[in-house]
Amino acid sequence: MTRVTFITPDGNQVQVEDAVGSLMNVATDNDITGIDADCGGVGSCGTCHVRVRPEWLEKVGKADALEKDLLDLEENATECSRLSCQIELTDEHDGLVVEVAGR
């Protein structure tokens, strides 16, 4: 079972148990503030931008070239930024903590 904690732009922590699928779908299914997912998860809008805690970067993986190009357009992107639609959760991600970038 995969447990994920979202830290919303207003500082609230929302923990989701039994998270399955993409991180974006988990966020939208649980009404996580700041995840709009306007493009439906195809990685073309940036409205599901999260910052992965540094200790999780290796397990989550870094953004590919196309994702990086889109994140470069985000003014508050960091080296820990990812699009949540591009993170497919596995058992290896149990305990994952991400900060929702918001808009």
Image (spheres, rainbow, N blue to C red):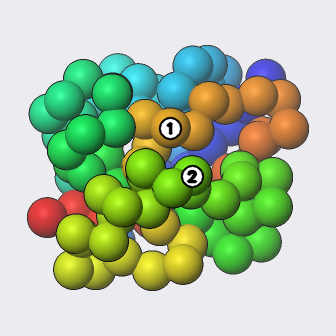
Q: Is residue 30 visible?
A: no
Location of the N terminus (image quadrant):
top right
Q: Are marks 2 and 1 in contact (CB under 8 Å)?
A: yes
The residue sitting at 36% across, 61% down in the picture is: 69
Q: Residue furthest right?
A: 92
Quarter location, residue 73: bottom left
In screen coordinates, is 84 left or right of 18? left
For disc 1, the neighbor class at 10 Å (few under 14, some 14 to 19, many from 20) is some
Number of numbered callouts drawn: 2
Q: Position of residue 103 (x, y in %)?
A: 14, 64
Of residue 39 and residue 16, the one placed in the foreground of this image is 39
On the image, numbered disc 2 is attached to which residue? 64
Q: How far, Cα to Cα, is label 2 from label 1?
A: 9 Å
Label 1 sits on what residue type? Gln
Q: Label 2, secondary structure: give it.
A: loop
Q: Is residue 50 left or right of 92 when viewed as pictured? A: left
Residue 98 position within the rendered picture, expressed as x and y whole percent measured from the top left: 53, 59
- In the displayed structure, 48 sits above or below 81; it is above
Q: Name which of mark 2 and mark 1 comes first in the sequence.
A: 2
Q: Return the x and y of residue 60 as percentages of the image width and height.
A: 71, 50
- Image coordinates for residue 47, horizontal then vertical, percent: 21, 48
Asked which secondary structure carries label 1, the reply is helix
Left/right of residue 102 with respect to residue 57 in the rendered view: left
Q: Amino acid at mark 2?
A: Asp
Of the pair 51 and 28, the residue shown nearer to us: 51
Quarter holding residue 92: top right
Q: Which mark is residue 86?
A: 1
- Residue drawn at (45%, 80%), measured in percent from left and top? 78
